[in-house]
């Protein structure tokens, strides 16, 4: 025997509202059934579910019951209890209820799809229900933006590593992992690889290290919907430290560090065929640098099976590279200049370009002398912004060179006091690659020294 389905729903926000409580809805729906003389009815209840979609257990069960022919009527207290989406409301009524001969009744709006007037009203009222849902979302979004502007953490998603969330204050507070975050930045800027840092600090993944390095919230900033706001939480690292890490992360074509390896591991390239080279034990004489094309131990690294590079003793190459680095460390570094904010320059250029596009659109609609003059001024503005951006990019490169030269001075002054890992990290920071062609040695540096030095 068919039954009348009484559908009840409350969302998380509305549970405290007596007018929408489950008990209040049930009372009104059962009163309706008594008034209409309906004795066979069943409740379908979704407690704490949003009306913005149909992924609700009771709705899914109701649809199954309707398709099996067990329901003759669906009754709700108010239309938005069924759904706040116009699309979903019309889908249920037109594609589920009506094709199976099921009437729909909304008590509050006095709607009954058994009549043509009731069916017409469904489309109108469901549109208003969706409008209200979108207004709620907009108000929530605007409130969240205002909250972030005041420096409070927006909530949602994962709390950044190194912080806990203080719900009472609405801000992030450093926890016992804050020291690990600072250690990650320090080690990375010393030249250690993300893989080595993760392994030595007990982190599960190498990727977690790079995520932490890229997380701007570590500087006391909140990034929300692409915009940056000063937060009220305590920064874990300085802005300068963060920017230095970003510059190293962006540095192109850096060979991967082979932690625990020899001094030049990962930097060696064959000058004949372009394949990588590796350290190979060469009896009592020590290690020899061998081209993988000749070694054949890793076929996927072979570039030329007939490569003529006979290799060279590692000690000789290491001495040449270190000696040249020490020589360069004695070259006075250029004085540091005030760095221009590159991101601000890019924003200014894009703003000028948008303004120019709008002026062109207005001029296309109505040619006007004032618009033509404005276009000319905006073109000059774009040109100035492009020039400022180029200067900012050059300034950033000079600062990067300055940081590497600072590491160079460490090589010249303290080389003998460093352990093997520290030496390797410093060399990797200063050197892009070392190209070997038999006895010929070419060193490519990570700073401007005419880019390349033939040192042997």
Image (cartoon, rainbow, N blue to C red):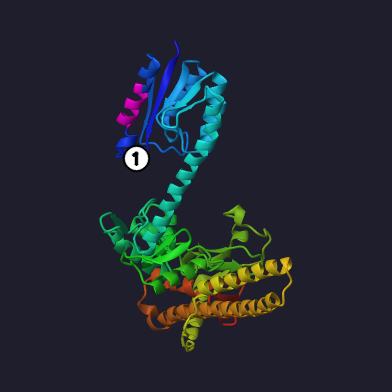
> In front here: 144 or 454?
144
Reply yes or no: does residue 23 show up in magenta.
yes
Above or below — where is 57 with respect to 411?
above
Tally of numbered discs: 1
x and y, in percent, of residue 33 in the image: 38, 19
Q: From the image, give the main secondary structure of the stretch colored magenta.
A: helix
Q: Residue at x 57, y 70 (%)?
A: 351
> In front here: 264 or 317?
264
For the N terminus, which image quadrant? top left
Side of 54 where 368 appears, left or right: right
Residue 150 seen anywhere in this rendered image of the structure: yes
Q: Which residue is mark 1?
A: 14
* Residue span colored magenta: 22-31
Reply yes or no: does residue 47 show up in magenta.
no
Are there few (<14), some (14-19), or many (20+) residues within 10 Å of tag 1? Answer: some
x and y, in percent, of residue 28 in the image: 34, 26
Residue 260 seen anywhere in this rendered image of the structure: no
Question: What SS does tag 1 mark?
Answer: loop
Side of 303 where 20 appears, left or right: left
Above or below — where is 317 with respect to 165?
below
x and y, in percent, of residue 144 in the image: 39, 56
Above or below — where is 428 with respect to 168?
below
For the C terminus, which image quadrant? bottom right
Q: Residue at x 64, y 77 (%)?
A: 378
Q: Residue at x 73, y 68 (%)?
A: 366
> In front here: 344 or 29?
29
> In front here: 272 or 117?
117
x and y, in percent, of residue 441 in the image: 59, 76
Side of 363 where 384 appears, left or right: left
């Amino acid at each position: 025997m068919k039954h009348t389905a009484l559908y009840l729903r409350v969302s998380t926000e509305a549970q405290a509202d007596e007018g929408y409580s489950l008990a209040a809805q049930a009372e009104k729906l059962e009163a309706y059934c008594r008034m209409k003389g309906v004795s066979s009815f069943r409740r379908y209840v979704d407690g704490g579910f949003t009306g913005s979609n149909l992924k609700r257990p009771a709705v899914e069960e109701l649809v199954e019951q309707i398709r099996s022919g067990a329901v003759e009527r669906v009754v709700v207290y108010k239309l938005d209890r069924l759904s706040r989406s116009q699309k979903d409301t019309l889908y249920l009524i037109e594609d589920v209820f009506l094709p199976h001969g099921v009437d729909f009744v909304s008590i509050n709006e006095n709607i009954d799809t058994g009549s043509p007037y009731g069916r017409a009203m469904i489309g109108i009222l469901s549109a208003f229900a969706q409008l209200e849902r979108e207004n709620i979302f907009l108000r929530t979004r605007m409130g969240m933006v205002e909250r972030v502007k005041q420096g409070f953490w927006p909530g949602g998603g994962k709390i950044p590593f190194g912080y806990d969330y203080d719900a009472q204050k609405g801000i992030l507070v450093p926890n016992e992992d804050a020291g690990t975050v600072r250690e990650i930045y320090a080690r990375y800027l010393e030249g250690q690889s993300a893989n080595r840092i993760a392994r030595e600090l007990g982190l599960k993944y190498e990727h977690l290290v790079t995520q932490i390095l890229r997380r701007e919230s570590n500087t006391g900033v909140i990034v929300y919907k692409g915009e940056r706001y000063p937060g009220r939480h305590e920064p874990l690292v300085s802005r300068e430290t963060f920017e230095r890490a970003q510059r190293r992360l962006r540095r192109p074509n850096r060979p991967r560090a082979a932690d625990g390896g020899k001094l030049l591991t990962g930097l060696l390239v064959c000058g004949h065929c372009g394949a990588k080279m590796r350290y190979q034990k060469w009896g009592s004489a020590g290690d020899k640098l061998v081209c993988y094309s000749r070694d054949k131990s890793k076929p996927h690294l072979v570039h030329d099976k007939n490569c003529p590079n006979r290799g060279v003793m590692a000690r000789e190459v290491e001495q040449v590279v270190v000696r040249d680095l020490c020589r360069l460390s004695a070259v006075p570094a250029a004085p540091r200049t005030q760095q221009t904010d590159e991101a601000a320059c890019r924003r200014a250029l894009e703003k000028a370009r948008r303004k120019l596009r709008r002026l062109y659109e207005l001029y296309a609609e109505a040619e006007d002398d004032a618009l033509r003059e404005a276009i000319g001024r905006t073109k000059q503005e774009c040109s100035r912004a492009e020039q400022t951006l180029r200067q900012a990019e050059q300034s950033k490169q000079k600062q990067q060179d300055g940081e590497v030269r600072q590491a160079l001075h460490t090589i010249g002054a303290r080389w003998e006091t460093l352990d093997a890992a520290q030496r390797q990290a410093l060399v990797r920071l200063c050197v892009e690659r070392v190209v070997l062609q038999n006895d010929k040695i070419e060193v490519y540096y990570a700073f401007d020294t005419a880019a390349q030095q033939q040192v042997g």
